[in-house]
Amino acid sequence: MKVIAVMPAFQEAKRIAEAVRGVRPRVDELVVVDDGSSDQTAKEARAAGAFVIRHRVNRGQGAALRTGTQAALNRKADIVVHIDADGQHDPQDIAALLQPIKGQRADVVFGSRFLGIQSDGMPLVRRVVLRGGRVFNAYALGIPKRVTDAQTGSRALNRRAATRLLERTTQDGRAHCSEMLKVLTDPALHWCEVPIHVRYTADTLAKGNQTWHAAEIVWKLFLGKVS
């Protein structure tokens, strides 16, 4: 089965090469989507061994993931893996994401930070917000309560699930994780979670979702439901 990883990136010139080198040996191909960076993200990713696609303007991580997923399917991927460019996700977890799909036990596998592996450096307030997001997803969006990680960016999809994601998701920005969870936990697909290890640093915490972004995510999801 051909495995292609998709890595959305924005202003990651300092970290992208290390991230690419960590992922590249564990997959057949790696597609980096440079989401309108003004630095050398694309150049560094290409030099490290990735196939690079560039958005001319910054469209958001959801848009970058859709672009990369479509590219992976065009390049004949049987499995598409989503992984971050900032080094938070441990490339060694890719094997665990792939195993249920390769064993034909799942169409979708989500990486969870809350299944027994301690994530280094996760602030308590972020842990509380993420658990609150789980409640919101369950009661407002109808996402199954047994999903333990409300905003996971680590996932693997077979071709059927990846095609469904492209057909049914529209969120470009921060709300894309919840929207993808809603689409990919549909009863038509078999899904599961596996534990992953996430590394937080001062740099990645400063750049990533902030606590107040939760309100933005809720608002955008509400607009998506009523529009």
Image (tube, rainbow, N blue to C red):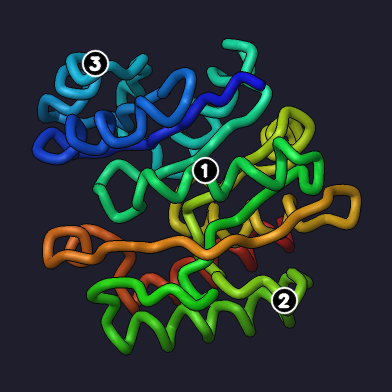
Q: Residue at x 73, y 82 (%)?
A: 139
Contact, mark 1 vs mark 2 (Cβ under 8 Å): no
Which one is earlier in the sequence, the residue at label 1 or at label 2?
Answer: 1
Q: Callout 1 environment at 10 Å: few (<14), some (14 to 19), or many (20+)? A: few
Place of residue 181 in the rendered image (x, y in percent of width and height, measured from the top left): 66, 58
Hey, what amino acid is under mark 2? Arg
Q: Residue at x 36, y 26 (%)?
A: 25
Q: Residue at x 14, y 29 (%)?
A: 38
Q: Secondary structure at mark 1?
A: helix
Residue that mark 3 sits on:
46
Quick one: which residue is furthest to the right in this view? 188
Residue that mark 1 sits on:
95
Hey, what amino acid is under mark 1? Ala
Indicate left or right for 132 with 34 as reference. Answer: right
Q: Compared with residue 132, is residue 165 higher up or lower down, i.e. above or below?
A: above
* Numbered circles on residues, count: 3
Q: Compared with residue 199, is residue 133 higher up or lower down, i.e. above or below?
A: below
Place residue 120 in its image quadrant. bottom left
Q: Compared with residue 107, is residue 221 higher up or lower down, i.e. above or below?
A: below
Residue that mark 2 sits on:
146
Q: Secondary structure at mark 2?
A: loop
Place of residue 195 in the rendered image (x, y in percent of width and height, measured from the top left): 52, 65
Hey, what amino acid is under mark 3? Arg
Which one is earlier in the sequence, the residue at label 1 or at label 3?
Answer: 3
Measure the alpha-carbon separation of dots 1 and 3: 24 Å
Along the line of sight, the residue nearer the viewer: 173 or 48: 48
Q: Residue at x 83, y 55 (%)?
A: 186
Q: Nearer the viewer, mark 1 or mark 2?
A: 1
